Structure formats: C-alpha cells, structure tokens
Amino acid sequence: MIIDIITIFPGMFGPLLNESIVKRAQQKGKVNIRVHDLRDYTLDKHRKVDDRPFGGGSGMVMCADPIFRVVGKLQGRKRKSETGDRLPRVILLCPQGKTLDQKSAKRIARYKHIILICGHYEGVDERVREGLADEEISIGDYVLTGGELPAMVLVDCVVRLLPGVLGDKNSLKFESFESNLLEYPQYTRPAEYRDMKVPAVLVSGDHKKIEGWRKEQSIQRTKERRPDLARNHKRS
Ligand SMILES: C[S@@+](CC[C@H](N)C(=O)[O-])C[C@H]1O[C@@H](n2cnc3c(N)ncnc32)[C@H](O)[C@@H]1O
C-alpha cells in the first residue's frame, strides 16, 4: 500500500514513521508512506497556504490551490471527474466526516493507494471537499488543532491490518471490535501479583475451557461497557 500524507507540519510524522509496527511495516515493504509539505506546492514567495474567510469571521482557511496541486501531482495530474477507482483514494481528515471505526479501517486497508489531507486553522476551503475528496474521516466528536494526529491514528490502525504486518494473524482475529465484541481480559506472568490471582481456568491447560471462558468474558464485557456493540453482536 502507498500512503501519501499532505500536511503543513511534516516533522510531526517522524515518531509515527520511525517506531514500532509502522516502522517495521515500511522496512518489510508492506507500506510506503510519503509525507508531503503543502508549502512546497504554493506559488508565492511567502509559501502561504491560508487566507481570510469570505464573508468574514474568525481564523484562517486553508486555500484550495496548493492542495489541488499536490493531489493532482500525486494522481498523475488527472481530475476527479476522470478518475474511476484506479486513482488513489483521497481522504480528508475532518471532524465533520464519518467517524473512523474498525470496519472502515478494514475497508480503507484494501485500497492500494490513499492520500490523506490534513487540515489546519479553521479548516479547508469547501472546494477541496467538493472537487477532490472521495471521503471525509473524523476520529471522534471533538475538535483538534490539525489533521496530523487524526492522520496518524488512521495510518496506525490501517497499517497493522495489512497482510503480513503483524507476526501472528490470530492477534487480529481475536481483537476488540471483531464480531462486535470487546476482547477478553489478558494476563501474563506472574500468576499471582499483589494478592491478585490469574483466573484458575487460564492456568488449567484445558484449551476448550479457556476458549469458552474467553468467549463468555468477551460477551459480558461488551454488554457492560458497550451495549450498542452487544446489540449488533446478537444480530450478526
Ligand atoms: C481546528 S480544526 C477545524 C474545525 C472546523 N472549524 C469545524 O468546526 O468543523 C482544523 C483541522 O483539524 C482536523 N481535525 C480536527 N478535529 C478532527 C477530528 N476529530 N477528526 C479528524 N480531523 C480533525 C481537520 O483536518 C481540520 O480541518
């Protein structure tokens, strides 16, 4: 997969790209992540990416032109109207978008090439939405300063879903949100810690019983913490 990230703060992505699973995924050639400085696509000597909003109001709005330029370059200079599905999927990070969840992360992980646009200030000129973005993704009902952290959240959860990125395929299969369930409680050594004991079944060696216990815990936990998911689990 190729992931292009468009931002006015390219330096923010260093820690994401140079640590842990995302770093290893790049080293293994599972993903190619490229960060583009939006200011490189401006035409004026001040490398200006924002301007005052038409109609007045507070703050600044990110201009459409540098964003259209960089996306156009990444798309091979074709316009959205000519696209079809073969062009990279353009995703605008935006608090007004559809909220990211595991299902949408899995869908996005199937694209061969995505372009992420990080907004800043009061947001981006509406024509970026109209003429460029294929979809808008929010990471939750709160407003952040910029799209960089949301882009990192999206990259992290998509990359770990790419085939061959996680060593053990099963770690994805039993994770929270699979089949609309939260994951069962996990323990590691020692079996007793500060008077708290690991449930006996987990050290019994009886794999069938362990599996049953885990399933039961998953269901119970989901009912207690996320009744909305538990309802969907019954239906699925
Ligand atoms: C300060 S926000 C703009 C908020 C905008 N004025 C509004 O009320 O909808 C600046 C940028 O941060 C990003 N952003 C902020 N919160 C976000 C969220 N919850 N999910 C995704 N992106 C977000 C977007 O890229 C947005 O363009």
Image: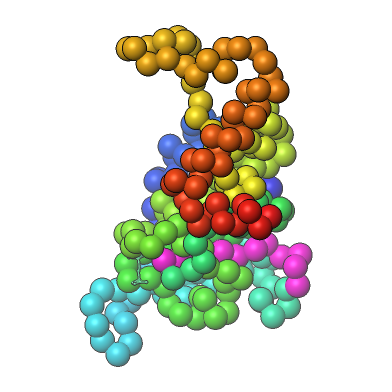
Whether residue 17 can be seen here: yes
Nearer to the camera, 200 or 88: 200
Determine the residue positioned at 62% across, 45% down.
Answer: 178
The answer to whether residue 226 is above or below residue 128 is above
Q: Nearer the viewer, residue 137 or 35?
A: 137
- Kindly identify the residue that appears in the image at 41 percent across and 10 percent down: 192
* Residue 121 falls within the magenta-colored stretch: no
Q: Does the magenta portion include 86?
A: yes
Position of 146 compared to 185: left or right? Answer: left
The residue at the far bottom in this view is: 55
Could you tell whether 172 is left or right of 125 in the image? right
Name the quarter showing ligand 1: bottom left
The residue that appears at 68% across and 31% down in the rendered structure is: 170
Res. 131 image quadrant:
bottom right
Q: Is residue 82 left or right of residue 221?
A: right
Q: Nearer the viewer, residue 215 or 148?
A: 215
Image x and y of residue 124, in percent: 42, 72
85, 78: nearer the viewer: 85
Instruction: Give the side of residue 13 with respect to residue 30, left or right.
Output: left
Relative to residue 39, is residue 201 depicted above or below?
above
Name the residue located 42 percent from the left edge and 14 percent from the top edge: 197
User: Looking at the image, is 150 positioned above or below residue 45?
Assistant: above
Region of the chain picked out in magenta, as a range:
84-95
- Position of the C terminus, as image quadrant, is bottom right
